[in-house]
């Protein structure tokens, strides 16, 4: 892969454009359970930028950031430890980090982020890892312009402030400010007290620790990608709908295929169990529902399990129904306040038998429009370090990129030697359902 270098032009602190009242904002137990940063990269093609729009994306976004922070003052504040060991947010108005940079290459060097390269770390800005929690900037935005006129917006946010839906809402609002709107079209709502302390036990956040391999696990893990066309997905949907008289979502079909192919490619013994986890937005599953605009953390971990022999000897329909039921049970557990039976959680949690899915297609990332259209590509930016293994055994579903139009891009993190096996099993599975395989390695 071609290397590139990013030169920092300016690094500044951006404060809200209007003074905001000094206040202490409460974080609920769910917010306090996700004390980590998440990185996000948004790619913009210069061909979509109208002549009337500023030729300097960094200037446009910097000004929009100052305006949107007026409505999201928590990001401009600082975390503070309380006497009981929890965190809260002091709205100090100190601001967030903004970096303007220039790359020495064009966007093609990124290759749609289908593979990991250490050079990509230059596209996000982060403070040293040993920074005290009370000195952390809760948001940083880095705008890197490329020689072709395209740009990458690298966003790093503290997860205690918001979840994926929340940061998507923030980015859409920042885009509205960049396009001249006076205020966000969706009013941001903090009100963390609407989430009750006992909600946490129904969301099963703790399950995601099981997708992390042990620290001594040293396989050669890489990032890879493949694509499924909507032609393929819709064909399978229609065929299964006709046969089973049920409707299925794109997520359920793709997740079912990936679960089967991954289980088979890893040659997991037939007498073991395989486990699948994926986040679900539960804002509308509580009574009363959380209002539109609530940007705090409120996703739960749906949990699916099957015996390897039963899963592989069964059909795609069986796998999809297990996934569908996992989503249903999580919603029902929260609505009825009945915890999942402990017996369903007593499973073999060997790390190679556990995978996680994340669906990023509709979180709002792509709709962040700063005046030159939606993002043409979105990607996480996770460091491949032994101390940061959250992405291992994980698949992210994204919208298609240039090399695979009109489909779902599957970003995967697994040992290098397993990628080929996985691709072969996916192609074999799809061949069972469609005569013409609409499948592409990216």
Image (cartoon, rainbow, N blue to C red):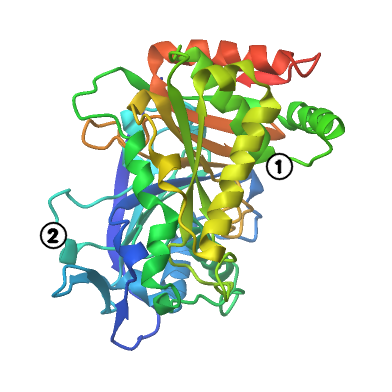
Q: Nearer the viewer, mark 2 or mark 1?
A: 1
Front residue of this view, candidates 148 and 36: 36
Looking at the rendered image, the quarter that the N terminus falls into is top left
Q: Against 264, is 383 above or below?
A: below
Instruction: Where is residue 234? Give x, y as percent.
Output: 78, 33
Looking at the rendered image, the quarter that the C terminus falls into is top right
Instruction: Where is residue 331? Give x, y as percent.
Output: 57, 57
Which residue was labeled with disc 1? Answer: 249
Front residue of this view, candidates 383 and 293: 293
Disc assigned to residue 132: 2
Disc assigned to residue 326: none
Q: Is residue 395 found left or right of 367 in the rendered image?
A: left
Q: Quadrant of residue 226?
A: top right
Q: Quadrant of residue 247?
A: top right
| Label 1 SS | loop
Residue at 62% in and 51% down: 374
Q: CA distance from mark 2 to mark 1?
A: 43 Å
Residue at 70% in and 18% down: 430
| Label 2 SS | loop
């Amino acid at each position: 892969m071609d290397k590139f270098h990013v030169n920092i032009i300016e690094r500044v602190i951006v404060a809200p454009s209007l003074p905001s009242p000094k206040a202490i904002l409460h974080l609920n137990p769910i917010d306090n359970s996700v004390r980590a940063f998440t990185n996000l990269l948004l790619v913009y093609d210069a061909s979509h930028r109208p002549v009337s729009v500023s030729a300097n994306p960094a200037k446009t976004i910097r000004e929009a950031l100052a305006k949107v922070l007026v409505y999201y003052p928590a990001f401009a504040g600082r975390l503070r430890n309380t006497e009981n060991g929890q965190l809260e947010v002091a709205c100090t108005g100190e601001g967030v980090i903004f970096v303007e940079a220039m790359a020495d290459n064009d966007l093609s060097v990124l290759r749609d982020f289908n593979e990991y390269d250490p050079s990509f770390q230059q596209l996000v800005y982060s403070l040293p890892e040993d920074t005290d929690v009370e000195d952390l900037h809760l948001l940083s935005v880095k705008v890197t312009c490329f020689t072709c006129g395209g740009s990458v917006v690298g966003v790093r946010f503290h997860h205690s402030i918001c979840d994926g839906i929340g940061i998507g809402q923030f980015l859409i609002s920042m885009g509205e400010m960049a396009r001249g709107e006076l205020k966000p079209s969706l009013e941001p709502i903090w009100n963390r007290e609407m989430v009750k302390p006992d909600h946490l036990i129904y969301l099963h956040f703790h399950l995601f620790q099981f997708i992390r391999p042990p620290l001594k696990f040293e396989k050669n893990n890489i990032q890879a990608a493949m694509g499924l066309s909507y032609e393929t997905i819709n064909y399978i949907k229609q065929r299964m709908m006709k046969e089973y008289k049920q409707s299925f979502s794109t997520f359920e079909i793709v997740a079912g295929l990936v679960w089967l192919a991954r289980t088979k490619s890893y040659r997991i013994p037939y007498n073991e169990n395989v486990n699948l986890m994926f986040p679900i937005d539960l804002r509308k599953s509580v009574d009363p529902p959380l209002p539109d605009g609530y940007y705090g953390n409120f996703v739960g971990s749906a949990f699916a399990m099957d015996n390897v022999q039963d899963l592989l000897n069964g059909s795609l329909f069986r796998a999809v129904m297990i996934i569908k039921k996992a989503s249903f049970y999580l919603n029902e557990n929260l609505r009825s306040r009945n915890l999942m039976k402990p017996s369903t959680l007593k499973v073999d949690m060997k790390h190679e038998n556990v995978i996680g899915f994340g669906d990023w297609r509709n979180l709002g990332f792509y709709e962040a429009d700063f005046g030159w259209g939606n993002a043409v590509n979105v990607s996480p930016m996770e460091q491949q370090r032994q101390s940061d293994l959250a992405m291992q055994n994980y698949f992210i579903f994204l919208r298609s990129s240039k090399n695979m139009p009109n489909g779902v891009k599957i970003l995967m993190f697994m040992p290098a030697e397993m990628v080929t096996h996985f691709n072969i099993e996916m192609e074999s599975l799809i061949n069972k359902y469609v005569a013409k395989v609409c499948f592409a390695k990216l």
